[in-house]
C-alpha cells in the first residue's frame, strides 16, 4: 500500500510546474517475492514493489534521485542504474562487489545520484547473479523543463521493455550450470512489458496491446532487458523512425526493423496510419543468434490496435491481423547495415565530443574459452568436452568476483589481496583471433583492473575470437558513454583500420555489440573517478568471466575527486 501511495504521489508531482533547475525526487523500491503466472506456470519470483517488470522511474535532467532500496527477500540484492554516468558518485552505480557490497536480507541502502547532462531512455536492473531476469524497469529522463525534443513532439510516450521468462528459477539454472560447467538452460519465452503474447501456449490473455489513434505520432521507448539474447523487432505494415540510442539523440532514420542488444535502449517514433485501417498489427521480436550454443528460438508478439471510429461496427477480434517479416536468425548483414546507420545527432546543441587525439590505446580480445573440470566430486563436466567447463574472458583473463567491493577497497587503501592493478594493454599471447583457434583454449583467472589517470583519453579496440565459435558480444561500460568510431570483420588491422574511423559523428552509447568474428573500436574520456565495471551483457558470458574493471584515479581539483562513501553503504 505504501509503495502504491508513493508512486501515486509522484504521478501528481510530475503534473505540477517545476523550477528550471533540478529538484530532488524520492523513491522507495521494495524488493519482494511474489507469485507470477505465465505460460500456465506459476512461480514465486523476486520483484520490485510487487510488480513484474518493476515500476517506471521518472526524472528530469539535472534532478537528484534518492532511491531507497529495501531488501525483503532471502537473496542478497543490488541495483544498477544502467547508463547513468554517476559523475563522482560511483557508490551509487550498483554492481555487487564492484562498487558496493550487496544489500543483505532485511537491510536497505539509499542510491543517491544526480543526472548530469543526460536525457532519454535508460533502465535499472539487479546486478548480482541472474536476479535481473525479473528485477528490472524503465528509467525515463525527461529533458529540462522548457527544453523540447529535437524531433516532433509525440502524442504519447510508451515504454516497451523486452524480457525473458523462465518457467523455473533462474538462480537454480545458473547454479546448476556453474556446477556442471555446461551451458545454462534457455528461457521459455520472450516478453514485452512482462507479457509473452498469443504465439505462446496459454498466453493469449497475457498480451501487450498498444492502442493508438490514427494520424498520431507515438514515441516508443524500447529497452532490451533480456538476459541472453539480442533481438530483432518490427511492427507489421509500419515503419518507425529511430531518434535515440542509449539516451543519446541520433540522426533520424526510418526502418522497418530494429536490432537491439541486451542492455541497449532505442527510442523510435511511430507515425500511425492517417485513417482507420480496419486491421490490427502484430509487433514481434525474436533473437539475432550468432553463437554455436542453444538459444530460445521463439517469438514474442504484442498487438497494435487502432481506436475504432464511433460508426465502426466490426468487433476488433474479427479484424485482419497482419504479421511482420523479421530478418533471419543469423542475419549479420542486416545487423551490420543497421548499426552503420546509427550516427550521433552532432548538432550545435547536442555535439559529438569525440576525442580527436588519444593518450592510451588498448587492444582487448573478447570471447569464450575453457576451464579444467572440477574433479573434487570426481564428476565429468558438460562443457565443450567431458573434462572441461565453459568459460569466457577479456584478453584471456576470466574475471573472478572478489568477496570485498573493489571501490571500497581502493578508497580505503586496502586493495592488497583484493585486486591486481595490472590488466594487460593487449593479449599476452597473440594469435590469429578469427582464424583457426589455438589448441590451448584454457583461460587464466584473476581480479585484474586497468588503472587510468584522471582525464586520460582512451581508445579501446575489442576483438571477437573464434575460440568455441565466433559470436556477437554486447559490451557495456559503466560510468561512461563512449563513441563507436569503427567496426569491422576479421582481425583488426592497426595500420589500415584506424584510417577509416569516424571521428565526426559516431554513435555515442554505453553498450556496443562487438560483431561476430569482428571488432569494435571505441573512444572515451576518463573524466569520472572510481571503479567502473565493463562486461558482456549476455548474462551467461558475464557469469563465465567475460568482465573486467577500470580504475580511474582522482584528479587534482576538488571537483575531480570521488565523493566520500555514504554512511549506509552496505558491508560485506
Image: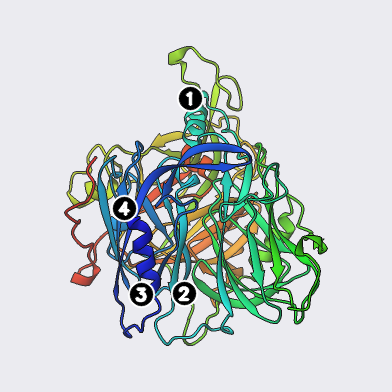
Nearest to N terminus: mark 2 or mark 3: 3
Residue 315's disc is none
Q: In which quarter of the image is residue 321?
A: bottom right
Q: Mark 4 points at which residue?
A: 69
Residue 12 at x, y = what percent?
38, 74
Foreground mark, 2 or 4, reads: 4
Q: Mark 2 points at which residue?
A: 356
Q: Which of 76 and 178 is in front in this view?
A: 76
Mark 4 lies on a secondary structure that is strand
> Could you tell me how far apart the alpha carbons at marks 3 and 1 are, in whole angstroms?
49 Å
Q: Can residue 454 be seen in this view?
A: no
Nearest to N terminus: mark 3 or mark 1: 3
Q: Name the residue under label 1.
A: 179
Q: In which quarter of the image is the N terminus?
A: bottom left
Nearest to N terminus: mark 1 or mark 2: 1
Residue at the location (34% across, 76% down)? Answer: 62
> Could you tell me how far apart the alpha carbons at marks 4 and 1 are, in whole angstroms?
31 Å
Nearest to N terminus: mark 4 or mark 1: 4
Q: Name the residue under label 3.
A: 13
Residue 472 at x, y = what percent?
61, 50
Q: In this view, does 297 lie to the left or right of 371?
A: right
Amino acid at each position: 500500500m505504501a509503495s502504491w501511495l508513493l508512486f501515486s504521489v509522484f504521478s501528481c508531482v510530475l503534473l505540477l510546474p517545476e523550477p528550471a533547475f533540478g529538484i530532488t525526487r524520492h523513491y522507495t523500491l521494495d524488493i519482494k517475492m511474489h507469485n507470477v503466472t505465465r505460460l500456465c506456470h506459476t512461480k514465486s519470483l523476486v520483484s520490485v514493489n510487487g510488480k513484474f517488470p518493476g515500476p517506471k522511474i521518472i526524472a528530469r535532467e539535472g534532478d537528484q534521485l534518492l532511491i531507497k532500496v529495501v531488501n525483503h527477500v532471502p537473496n542478497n540484492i543490488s541495483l544498477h542504474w544502467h547508463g547513468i554516468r554517476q559523475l563522482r558518485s560511483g557508490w551509487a552505480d550498483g554492481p555487487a562487489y564492484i562498487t558496493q557490497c550487496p544489500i543483505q536480507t532485511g537491510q536497505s541502502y539509499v542510491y543517491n545520484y544526480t543526472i548530469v547532462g543526460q536525457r532519454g531512455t535508460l533502465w535499472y536492473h539487479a546486478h548480482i547473479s541472474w536476479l535481473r531476469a525479473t528485477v528490472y524497469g524503465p528509467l525515463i529522463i525527461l529533458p529540462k523543463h522548457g527544453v523540447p525534443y529535437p524531433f516532433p513532439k509525440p502524442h504519447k510516450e510508451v515504454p516497451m521493455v523486452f524480457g525473458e521468462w523462465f518457467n523455473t528459477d533462474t538462480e537454480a539454472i545458473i547454479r546448476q550450470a556453474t556446477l556442471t560447467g555446461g551451458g545454462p538452460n534457455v528461457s521459455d519465452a520472450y516478453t514485452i512489458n512482462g507479457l509473452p503474447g498469443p504465439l505462446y501456449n496459454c498466453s493469449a490473455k497475457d498480451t501487450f496491446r498498444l492502442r493508438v489513434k490514427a494520424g498520431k505520432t507515438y514515441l516508443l521507448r524500447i529497452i532490451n532487458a533480456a538476459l541472453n539474447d539480442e533481438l530483432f523487432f518490427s511492427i507489421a505494415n509500419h515503419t518507425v523512425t529511430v531518434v535515440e540510442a542509449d539516451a543519446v539523440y541520433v540522426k533520424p532514420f526510418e526502418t522497418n526493423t530494429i536490432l537491439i542488444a541486451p542492455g541497449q535502449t532505442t527510442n523510435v517514433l511511430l507515425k500511425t496510419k492517417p485513417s482507420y485501417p480496419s486491421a490490427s498489427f502484430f509487433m514481434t521480436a525474436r533473437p539475432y543468434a550468432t553463437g554455436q550454443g542453444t538459444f530460445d528460438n521463439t517469438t514474442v508478439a504484442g498487438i497494435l490496435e487502432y481506436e475504432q471510429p464511433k460508426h465502426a461496427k466490426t468487433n476488433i477480434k474479427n479484424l485482419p491481423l497482419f504479421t511482420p517479416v523479421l530478418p533471419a536468425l543469423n542475419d549479420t548483414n542486416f545487423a551490420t547495415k543497421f548499426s552503420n546507420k546509427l550516427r550521433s545527432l552532432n548538432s550545435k546543441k547536442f555535439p559529438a565530443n569525440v576525442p580527436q587525439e588519444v593518450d592510451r590505446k588498448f587492444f582487448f580480445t573478447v570471447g569464450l574459452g575453457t576451464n579444467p573440470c572440477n574433479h573434487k566430486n570426481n564428476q565429468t563436466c558438460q562443457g565443450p568436452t567431458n573434462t572441461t567447463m565453459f568459460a569466457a574472458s577479456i584478453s584471456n583473463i576470466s574475471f573472478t568476483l572478489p568477496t570485498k567491493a573493489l571501490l571500497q577497497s581502493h578508497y580505503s587503501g586496502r586493495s592488497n589481496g583484493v585486486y591486481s592493478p595490472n590488466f594487460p594493454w593487449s593479449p599476452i599471447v597473440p594469435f590469429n583471433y578469427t582464424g583457426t583457434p589455438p589448441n590451448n583454449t584454457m583461460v587464466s583467472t584473476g581480479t585484474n583492473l586497468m588503472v587510468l589517470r584522471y582525464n586520460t583519453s582512451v581508445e579501446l579496440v575489442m576483438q571477437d575470437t573464434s575460440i568455441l565459435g565466433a559470436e556477437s558480444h554486447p559490451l557495456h561500460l559503466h560510468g561512461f558513454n563512449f563513441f563507436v568510431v569503427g567496426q569491422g570483420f576479421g582481425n583488426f588491422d592497426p595500420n589500415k583500420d584506424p584510417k577509416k574511423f569516424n571521428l565526426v559523428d559516431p554513435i555515442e552509447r554505453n553498450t556496443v555489440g562487438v560483431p561476430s568474428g569482428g571488432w569494435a573500436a571505441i573512444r572515451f574520456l576518463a573524466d569520472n573517478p572510481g571503479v567502473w565495471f565493463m562486461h558482456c551483457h549476455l548474462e551467461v558470458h558475464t557469469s563465465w568471466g567475460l568482465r573486467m574493471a577500470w580504475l580511474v584515479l582522482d584528479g587534482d581539483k576538488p571537483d575531480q575527486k570521488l565523493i566520500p562513501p555514504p554512511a549506509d553503504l552496505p558491508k560485506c
